Every structure is written in structure tokens, then in C-alpha cells.
Amino acid sequence: MKKTILSVALATAVSSTLPVFADAAEQKTAPVSTTIQQTVLNKAAEGKAGTTASPNVNVNFDALGIANAIVNAVNANANRSGFVKGVMESTFYAAGARYNVMVFNLSQNYQDRLSGVKTFATVQYGKVVYGIWVFESGTFKNNGDGGWDNWAFRGWFDRQDKFVTFRRP
């Protein structure tokens, strides 16, 4: 299994050139991140890159090939809680609604025991960095603040306050 590293500082420049979430499908191999990076560079060279700052996206591991969907979700939301919810929903459907998803503010303390991780990415919203996990099962404990500003998750789970047990669908 290959690891893919994706750094997109000008994600807004490529939002119109990326596939729609509904078209994202699980791939046998990780996607080639240089295509996205080259698109960003081409748009910037053409003067089509936006001048407003957008969140940074770093996909560290992507066995499902859903990096493009995460980039689109980052670009679609203007408020923090909407951003967190939007990234969670978009990632869930980009992964074919077959895996659990956790989006979490990494400045908060947490404990995780996640199994079958298919994708891990980080995105930055303002000064806040979020982790995004797509996985099969496991546990996650939020030791920090709750609320949509700090975390969102979707899948098959049982929750007791800030402790979540995820199971396979």
C-alpha cells in the first residue's frame, strides 16, 4: 500500500477542477498527488489563483483516493462549525458511506484506538488544525471541549458523553 502526501496551500484555485464527491470511489492504489499540486501551480501561474487565504490540506495517507473530496469540503464552508460538519459529511460520502469518519481539533487532547485506517488527513481552518480519520472500527475519547467547532463524527457507533466506540458497518 502506498502513502500519498498532498500539500495544497491554494486549494480554492482547484475547487472547480476537482471531481464531485458523488463521483469519488474507492481506488485500488493511492491517487497521484502531483496532479493536484500541478493544477494548483498552473492556476497560480495563470493568475487564476484566489488572493484570499484558504485552509491548508495535507493528506498523509489515502488508501481510498478521496483527497480531492476533502479539498472540496474545505473550500465549501465559511464558518467553523459548518466547516467541521461539512468536512465530516463530505468525507463520509466520498468514502462511499462504508467507513466511519472522525474530524477532530488537534489542539485538543484525545485518545484513539482506531483500526483499519483508510485515510488520515489534516486540514487547517484559520489557526485551527483538524485531523480527519476514515477507518473501520475502534474507540475515540475527546479529552477537550466538545461541540461542532471541535469535533464531528459519522458512521456506526455508540457514544457515552465524550467516549465513542465505532464498529464496522
Image: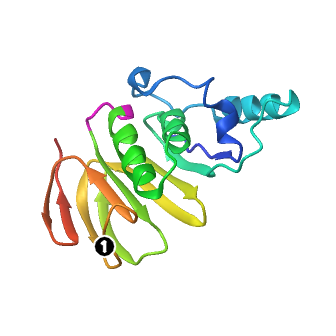
Q: Position of residue 136 (x, y in %)?
A: 26, 48
Please give the name of the residue rendered at 71% of the width and 42% of the height, measured from the top-left corner: 10
Q: Position of residue 63 (x, y in %)?
A: 45, 39
- SS type, badge 1: strand
Q: Position of residue 153 (x, y in %)?
A: 29, 54
Q: Amino acid at mark 1?
A: Asn
The kind of secondary structure the magenta stretch mainly shows is loop
Residue lying at the far front of the rendered structure:
79
Residue closer to the observer: 17 or 118: 17
Q: Quadrant of residue 112?
A: bottom left
The residue where tag 1 is placed is 142
Please give the name of the residue rendered at 31% of the width and 66% of the height, measured from the top-left corner: 147
Residue lying at the far top of the rendered structure:
23
Mark 1 surroundings: few (<14), some (14-19) or many (≥20) residues within 10 A: some
152 relative to 118, above or below = below
Q: Is residue 87 in view?
A: yes
Residue closer to the observer: 23 or 146: 146
Horizontal side of 36 relative to 131 (left or right) equals right
Q: Position of residue 42 (x, y in %)?
A: 81, 28
Q: Is 89 one of the magenta-colored residues?
A: no
38 relative to 113, above or below = above
63 relative to 105, above or below = above
Horizontal side of 143 relative to 7 (left or right) equals left
Q: How many marks?
A: 1
Which range is magenta? 94-98
Please give the name of the residue rendered at 62% of the width and 46% of the height, measured from the top-left corner: 5
